[in-house]
Image: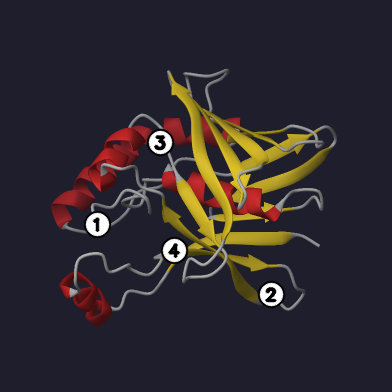
């Protein structure tokens, strides 16, 4: 059965946030995001990882400066109290629009790698995502289908006009560019990112769920069409 992984935000509690800001220095804030897993016929979901940025020694300003170059660093905790790590995503390299990330288990052993090649910088006109897991076939996916990108660019001038009107009117929305990604490995489709629900669908049993959860968080960190990405916060 297909498993569905979705990055979600913990509902905001303004009173709790206010109390956290007023707390003594060194007080640890709760993890603000988590990944849910749906893998039952009933469609019920459960949290399987609690995700947050792993900040460098210089803190948030240094992280935000580095992320502009494609650098990312996440921790996937088994529980919101941060008692044990499920996995960690680190940046191995990033240059000229091509970034390589490694996902490691709680003891630091590699689980798999994720390569992101930005559109026009890598090997094509679309952003290319490559997921590699030891002992498994390489899975390659492209952001959006060529046909829908062609349609989107045809209506782009109209979307610009709508966007300007929305800003002036203080509301509204414009159509997103194609965002769906289908990964192919040989003759199968092991992974799929569906843009309508921002979900990573795992179709192959050999895909490590920790790697898929890290992928869900990574993709959403680059998705800024509808607001600020989850890891691009100043606090």
Name the residue carrying label 4.
33
Res 197 visible: no
Q: Which element carries disc 2, helix, strand or loop?
A: loop
Q: Position of residue 15 (x, y in %)?
A: 23, 82
In the drawing, what numbered circle is on residue 43?
A: 2
Up the image or down, 142 lies above or below 55; here it is above
Mark 1 surroundings: few (<14), some (14-19) or many (≥20) residues within 10 A: few
Q: Pick whichever of labels 1 and 3 is earlier in the sequence.
A: 3
Q: Is residue 172 left or right of residue 216?
A: left
Q: CA distance from mark 1 to mark 2?
A: 34 Å
User: Among all residues in the image, which is located at the extreme right?
Assistant: 187
Q: CA distance from mark 3 to mark 4?
A: 35 Å
Q: Pick whichever of labels 3 and 4 is earlier in the sequence.
A: 4
In the drawing, what numbered circle is on residue 50?
A: none
Name the residue carrying label 3.
155
Q: Position of residue 123 (x, y in %)?
A: 57, 17
**Label 1 vs label 2, nearer the camera:** 1
Res 106 visible: yes
**Label 3 vs label 4, nearer the camera:** 4
Q: Residue at x 72, y 50 (%)?
A: 208
Q: Residue at x 53, y 27 (%)?
A: 126
Q: Pick whichever of labels 2 and 3 is earlier in the sequence.
A: 2
Q: CA distance from mark 2 to mark 4?
A: 21 Å
């Amino acid at each position: 059965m297909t498993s569905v992984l979705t990055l979600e935000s913990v509902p905001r509690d303004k009173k709790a946030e206010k109390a956290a800001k007023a707390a003594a220095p060194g007080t640890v804030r709760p993890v603000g995001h988590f990944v849910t897993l749906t893998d039952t016929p009933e469609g019920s979901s459960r949290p399987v990882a609690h995700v947050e940025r792993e900040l460098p020694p210089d803190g948030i300003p240094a992280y935000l400066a580095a992320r502009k170059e494609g650098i990312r660093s996440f921790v996937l905790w088994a529980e919101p109290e941060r008692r044990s790590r499920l996995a960690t995503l680190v940046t191995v390299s990033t240059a000229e629009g091509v970034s390589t990330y490694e996902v490691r288990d709680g003891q630091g052993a590699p689980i798999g790698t994720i390569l992101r090649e930005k559109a026009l910088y890598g090997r094509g006109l679309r952003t290319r995502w490559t997921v590699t897991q030891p002992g498994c076939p390489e899975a390659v996916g492209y952001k959006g289908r060529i046909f829908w990108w062609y349609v989107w660019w045809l209506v782009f001038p109209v979307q610009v006009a709508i966007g300007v009107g929305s800003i002036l009117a203080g509301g509204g929305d414009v159509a997103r560019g194609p965002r769906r990604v289908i990964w192919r490995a040989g003759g199968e489709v092991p992974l799929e990112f569906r843009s309508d629900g921002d979900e990573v669908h795992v179709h192959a049993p050999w895909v490590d769920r920790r790697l898929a959860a890290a992928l869900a968080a990574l993709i959403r960190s680059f998705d800024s069409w509808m607001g600020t990405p989850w890891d691009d916060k100043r606090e």
